[in-house]
Amino acid sequence: QEQMVASGGGSVQAGGSLRLSCVVSGNTTTRACMGWFRQAPGKLREGVAGIYTRGGMPYYADSVKGRFTISQDNAKKTMYLQMDSLQSDDTAMYFCGAARLPCMLGGTWGGFNYWGQGTQVTVSS
């Protein structure tokens, strides 16, 4: 059973940066897709960035494109989300998720059914 632990959240002013990390443990050989999701109070969880574990084009939601960068270090079993030019609308609990094949980045985010605990990001204007 996979376990994922997210960290790196915090409070920053608008325009600032944070780097989130998601460390995966357990059996990771079946992971095909990983992603970062967020959920603000009163809103549905949304996927913001995703990556195929074996390479390929990452996915970014329009709201974060050009500001967030997703990356992975397979040797460290860690996924990152570099968040720059943060805005107040980015305030949310951020979660990392994983999926086996078949999986989809964006859209319905099909296949994602493994979730880590969240890390809070608060951006003040």
Image (cartoon, rainbow, N blue to C red):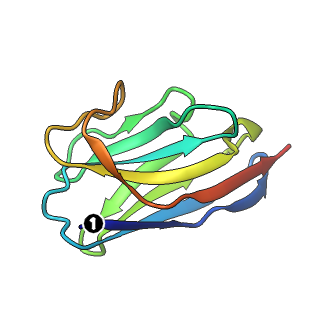
Q: Nearer the viewer, residue 117 or 49?
A: 117
Q: Is residue 25 above or below residue 122?
A: below
Name the residue nearer the viewer: 68 or 120: 120
Judge left or right: residue 91 versus residue 118.
Answer: right
Amino acid type, callout 1: Glu
Residue placed under numbered mark 1 in the picture: 2
Residue 98: x percent and y percent? 30, 51
* Residue 65, horizontal then vertical, whole percent: 51, 33
Work out whether residue 84 can be spotted: no
Q: Residue at x 19, y 49 (%)?
A: 32
Q: Is residue 75 left or right of residue 108?
A: left
At label 1, counting other C-alpha atoms closer than 10 Å, the crowd grade (few under 14, some 14-19, many 20 or more) is some
- State the SS at label 1: loop
| Viewport quadrant of the C terminus | top right
* Residue depicted at x 38% and y 65%: 4
Camera-side residue: 42 or 9?
42
Quadrant where the N terminus sits is bottom left
Asked if residue 12 is positioned above or below residue 40 in the image, the reply reads: below
Q: Residue at x 67, y 44 (%)?
A: 85
Residue 45 appearing in the image: yes
Residue 107 falls left or right of residue 123: left
Residue shown at the point (50%, 61%) measured from the top left: 117
Pick out the residue farthest to the right: 125
Residue 54 pos. (x, y %): 16, 52
Q: Nearer the viewer, residue 82 or 94?
A: 94
Question: Is 19 rendered above or below residue 91?
Answer: below
Q: Position of residue 109 (x, y in %)?
A: 33, 33
73 lies left or right of 9:
left
